[in-house]
Amino acid sequence: MCGIVGMLRRDGAPADRAVVERMRDVMAHRGPDGRGLFADGPVALGHLRLSIIDLAGGGQPMTTPDGRFTIVFNGEIYNHGDLRRELEPKHAYRTSSDTESLLHGYREWGPALLDRLEGMFAFAIWDAREKKLFCARDRLGKKPFYYADRPDVFLFASEVKALLEFPGFPREVDPEGMELYLAVGYTPAPWTLFRGVRKLPAGHSAGVAARVETREYWDVRPERADVTPEAVRQRVETAIVKRLISDVPVGCYLSGGIDSSIVSGVVAKRNPELRTFSAGFAAADRDKFNVDLDMARVASKRFGTIHSEVLVDDAVDLPALVRRVAWALDEPIANAASIPTYLVAKLAREKGVPVLLSGDGADELFAGYDRYLSDALVTTYRRVPGWARAMASPFLRLNANLAKLDRKARLEPGPERYLTWHEAFPRAVRDALVTTKLPGPEFVREVVAKTIARPQTDNFQERLLYGDLKLWIAEESNMRMDKMSMLASVETRAPFLDHHLVEFAAGIPFAEKVRGRRYKALLRDAFRDLLPEEIRTRSKWGFIPPASEWLRTRLNPLANELFAPPKLRHFRHDTVKSLFDAHVSKKAYHLPRLWILLAFQLWQETYLP
């Protein structure tokens, strides 16, 4: 796990080593174990190293013996040993690092190398003969790759803050990125909130010379296989064990949910000294916000792990921490879970564990959220004749949950229905809020429509799962986890996002995943004997910080400051004040909307002039 940066001049000027060094060093948290720089005429590549494999060797940038290819790489290639055995007869190795397998693999197979890789990665390879960069991001978007494509220069980096070190780089809001952010609380690729900055989408590569030519090299290809709990267990365990390769200690995030408990339980069988880590909250309603902490203790006791906890209490300077998180994220991600995620990673680093395995992705593979089951109810209800639904509608509106079912059932399976499960600002609220000219909500619908139209299925719940995997996982969950763990100089690995496991799960019919209308039923059954009963049968909860309470207490002064008229460049003060006052006084619940606004205001204060 590392940080990468690069510059390719297109105007005939040599790449500026000093600028690339500044770009690299602003991300020093991504690589405390080494720094490297390569410069040759129009190109310069920088690297920060967090040593995980081949601690003594493997420094970057790395160049082939003939001087033609030079690479900077961020990530881990779990099958690099297999690649090495195939490549070594033709290519002399000087290290035991996975970086060198990438370098020789590109020499041997060119872009077709990507089809052979298993892991998480973002890398760039300079071809000195062709004067061209080849860039790639892993299939599920676990590693970030930002770039700026300008007439005079092409820049790339693991974090946007590095690009901003380029002299005169504009710091302006991208209208399309802002429209997307206000809709869903993050910015899907290729957009960002910075005008002139783009993200290479997950599963894409790019050739860069006079222009950037992107290509999608992977999309989910559902595997048709026998669906049994035993088959699910075998695939999941294989993905977990594959991610234990390391020359440094490996631990686990342990939230007490099904997914992290499965990962921890499987690893604990192979490592009796496994260290696990959790977070809790000193909240007024302790029982509500520490359900996961209590369940993590149950799992740790069952698996015999060495367990450590961090408590977000009054000793934590929460406003300062929120500002630090905003700086680290580069773009606002409206999820208060960023805060405890960073603190858990920081605790692991302090305990000497620089690699953590997480349970991320299981919900999107095996239908772990209530919205999937609820949407299945919508599908069922839509089969009721229209006249009968019209008669029932007035009665359904008497109950809030049934009223939602009635409203959703009026929507065709498509982007509008997808967004009802994610959208924070409905059109009426958005129009009363935003003062800046933006593309409009239809732009968001078009982006979502292009994504959820891709799966070859008539089952809308399967389209929901696919949409969440390609949009939310890649650019919210993965980016939040990458930025928060790397802020603590910790590498996070997500076994459930193994692309073989993703394709296997995509081939399982939705009804099989939720047998008996139980979310994640198939996954629960697969690990029935491993999971403690109270965890296996618990209701879905999620890693929920007491953010509502924070807005009313510890973060209230910060929110009032950021929501003051002089700070609100893009939003109407009366609308923001109305939302905030209603929430603080407990007359309404507006946490998702307010956190989107707070995160945006923090980002604006941090990065815009």
Image (cartoon, rainbow, N blue to C red):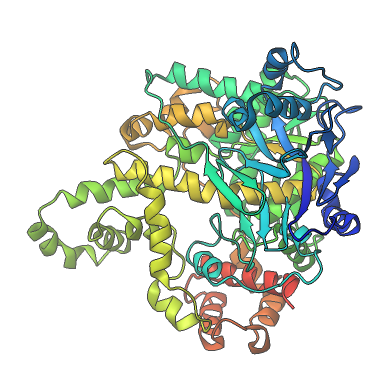
Q: Where is residue 393? Give x, y as percent.
A: 17, 64
Q: Where is residue 401? Give x, y as percent.
A: 32, 59
Q: Where is residue 379? Give x, y as percent.
A: 24, 48
State the count of labels. Answer: 0
User: Foreground residue, 334 or 199?
Assistant: 199
To which quarter of the image does residue 296 belong?
top right
To which quarter of the image does residue 602 belong?
bottom right
User: Foreground residue, 149 or 560?
Assistant: 149
In the image, 122: left or right of 50? left
**574 w.r.t. 203: above or below:** below
Q: Where is residue 131? Give x, y as percent.
A: 73, 44
> Which residue is rendered at x = 42% and y = 39% of the image?
367
Q: Residue furthest top?
A: 89
**482 w.r.t. 230: above or below:** below
To which quarter of the image does residue 206 belong?
top right
> Which residue is rendered at x = 62% and y = 28% of the image?
113
In the image, 591: left or right of 49? left
Q: Residue furthest left?
A: 387
Residue 287 can be seen, yes or no: no
Quarter placement of the N terminus: top right
> Which residue is rendered at x = 85% and y = 30% of the image?
58
> Which residue is rendered at x = 77% and y = 62% of the image?
324
Residue 94 can be seen, yes or no: yes
Quarter placement of the C terminus: bottom right
